[in-house]
Image (cartoon, rainbow, N blue to C red):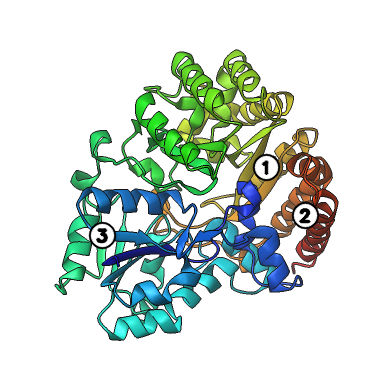
């Protein structure tokens, strides 16, 4: 039996019906849909082989790979199969994305439904489970890390209540070994470990995953050159993986037989291999030709509108490669604001190689290209950005109106103080102005307008297509009604 176990809560141990967009459903609180049905619709549990999930979150797989590289005995275990493995384990690593529902999407939905989100509910249930508490009494150490580790700074009391021994914040390849080594030896470990700049791993220090990731996610780079003030990722150095490293992880996912499609992950896939904000056509085409030669499908985690708009011909070439084997593909896109003044103030490089003053036109150009090339963007807007004025909200509303004819989802999110803005105030539902409420309704109307075609594409060819579409449409109708009831 392994000395170290790795896991994540139920909302993260799901493939979301092989559609990452549905993962947004974990940000919602328990609601009018029975929990058993809601969880099936939005985050069905992963199949397991014994105690082990067939796939696992990519970040968890990276930690697993690093610990194996350093010679530890480690197992990644389903959260519903921890009881027996915990009897021999000395340390438990828990991967977190949004442990207290403090992320932008979660805080927005929690405000609408007036309850704690599912992802926070399941995370806390995991650490309060009888099997984990019993193992703690026998000396088990709990180490928590992942993109959501920053939230523990706002929930210090919960660290004690949940009996967490150490929170790791940052890219941890160079530190997890020494932390878990101390934990299994019974030595003291820091209650909060923030990875220093000098400890950030170089490319050659980042291990390849050794077991498949959920939905075939493969990282192609880390960091971001855009420098948006509200984002943590931009504070990390930009590093692009060489093509052979990407191919090795691609093969890990494909040879497992659990995935025939791949999700390329970086903060801006369109900038793969570039040294600035201008796409590198040669490297992008090489990457996509490699992936589509091996896979039956492909998606992107994120890309920027400016990078797409800066090279329409290249984007169309990439689209032709991708659409050889699928009807469409998707990515998460940050619009954030329709106000050039706000864009210039807090995200001036997001428009590069264009000027921040051209942000409205950049968004429309990029979104139009995505529509024409059958990419479906899940777009975010941020409500309540620092120093936002009424005229800024009006400009965002004008932009959303101009995007009506472009196939997309537009998700308004409340401002959460991260990155260089971490000391600013949170935006909550009590600060919603009449214009903010109107913008929420406008986005809901936009999403509902495009819902039918998006569901048709998502469930095309599947035997349960009709019933699934009706459930999701029903949820959308009631959610839109809830938005209209905000006071």
Task: Indicate the quadrant containing the N terminus: top left, top right, bottom left or bottom right.
Answer: bottom left
Which label was assigned to residue 396?
A: 1
Residue 109 lies, with reference to residue 460, above or below; the image says below
Position of residue 36 measured from the top left corner of the image (x, y, whole percent): 69, 71
Q: Is residue 68 visible?
A: yes
Q: Nearer the viewer, mark 1 or mark 2?
A: 2
Question: Residue placed at 78% from the left, 40% from the top?
Answer: 460
* Furthest residue in direction front, as rendered: 50
Q: Hey, which quadrant is residue 89 in on the image?
A: bottom left
- Residue 105 is left or right of residue 41, and the answer is left
Residue 282 location, x and y as percent? 46, 13
Tell me if residue 163 comes above or below residue 248 in the rendering.
below
Which mark's residue is nearer the viewer, 2 or 3? 3
First in sequence: mark 2 vs mark 3:
3
Mark 1 element type: helix
Neighbours of disc 3 within 10 Å: few (<14), some (14-19), many (20+): some
Numbered badge on residue 73: 3
Q: What is the C-alpha distance between the residues marked 2 and 3?
A: 51 Å
Observer-nearest residue: 221 or 210?
Answer: 210
Identity of the residue drawn at 80% across and 48% down: 463
Left or right of 248? Residue 472 is right
In this view of the protein, which residue sits in the foreground, 400 or 453? 453
Q: Nearer the viewer, residue 107 or 260?
A: 260
Disc with the residue nearer the chain's start (1 vs 2)? 1
Q: Counting residues from the N terminus, which is met first, the one under dot 1 or under dot 3?
A: 3
| Residue 241 in sight | no
Q: Residues within 10 Å of mark 2 (few under 14, many from 20)?
A: many
Determine which of the numbered discs, if any, sits on residue 441 in the image: 2
CB atoms of marks 2 and 3 within 8 Å: no
Q: Is the C terminus in the top left, top right, bottom left or bottom right quadrant?
A: bottom right
């Amino acid at each position: 039996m392994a000395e170290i176990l790795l896991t994540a809560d139920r909302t993260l141990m799901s493939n979301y019906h092989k559609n990452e967009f549905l993962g947004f459903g974990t940000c919602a609180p328990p609601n009018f849909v029975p929990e058993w049905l809601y969880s099936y619709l939005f985050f069905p549990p992963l199949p397991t082989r014994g105690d082990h999930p067939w796939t696992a979150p990519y970040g968890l797989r990276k930690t697993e790979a690093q610990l194996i590289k350093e010679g530890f005995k480690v197992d990644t275990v389903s959260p519903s199969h921890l009881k027996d493995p915990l009897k021999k384990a000395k340390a438990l690593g828990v991967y977190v994305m949004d442990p207290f529902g403090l992320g932008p999407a979660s805080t927005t939905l929690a405000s609408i439904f007036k309850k704690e989100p599912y992802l926070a509910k399941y995370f806390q249930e995991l650490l309060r489970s009888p099997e984990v508490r019993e193992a703690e009494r026998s000396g088990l150490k709990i180490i928590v890390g992942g993109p959501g580790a920053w939230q523990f700074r706002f929930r210090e009391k919960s660290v004690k209540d949940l009996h967490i021994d150490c929170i790791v914040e940052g890219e941890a390849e160079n530190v997890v070994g020494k932390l878990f080594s101390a934990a299994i030896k019974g030595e003291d470990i820091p209650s909060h470990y923030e990875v220093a700049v000098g400890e950030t791993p170089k490319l050659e220090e980042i291990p390849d995953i050794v077991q498949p990731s959920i939905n075939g996610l493969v990282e192609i780079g880390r960091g971001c050159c855009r420098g948006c003030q509200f984002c943590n990722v931009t504070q990390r150095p930009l590093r692009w993986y060489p093509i052979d490293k990407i191919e090795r992880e691609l093969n890990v996912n494909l040879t497992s037989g659990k995935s025939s499609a791949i999700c390329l992950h970086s903060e801006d896939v369109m900038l793969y291999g570039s040294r600035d904000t201008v796409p590198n056509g040669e490297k992008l085409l090489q990457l996509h030709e490699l992936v589509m030669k091996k896979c039956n499908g492909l998606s992107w985690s994120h890309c920027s509108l400016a990078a797409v708009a800066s090279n329409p011909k290249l984007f169309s070439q990439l689209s032709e490669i991708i659409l050889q084997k699928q009807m469409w593909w998707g990515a998460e896109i940050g619009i954030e604001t329709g106000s050039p003044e706000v864009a210039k103030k807090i995200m001036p490089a997001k428009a590069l190689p264009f000027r921040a003053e051209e942000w409205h036109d950049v968004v429309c150009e990029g979104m139009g290209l995505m529509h024409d090339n059958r990419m479906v963007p899940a777009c975010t807007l941020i409500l309540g950005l620092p120093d936002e004025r009424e005229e800024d909200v009006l400009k965002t509303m004008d932009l959303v109106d101009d995007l009506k004819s472009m196939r997309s989802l537009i998700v308004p999110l409340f401002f959460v103080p991260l990155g260089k803005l971490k000391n600013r105030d949170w935006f909550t539902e009590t600060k919603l102005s009449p214009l903010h409420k109107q913008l929420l309704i406008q986005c809901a109307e936009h999403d509902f307008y495009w819902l039918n075609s998006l569901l048709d594409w998502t469930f095309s060819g599947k035997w349960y297509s009709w019933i699934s579409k009706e459930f999701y449409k029903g949820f959308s109708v009631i959610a839109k009604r809830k938005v209209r009831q905000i006071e």
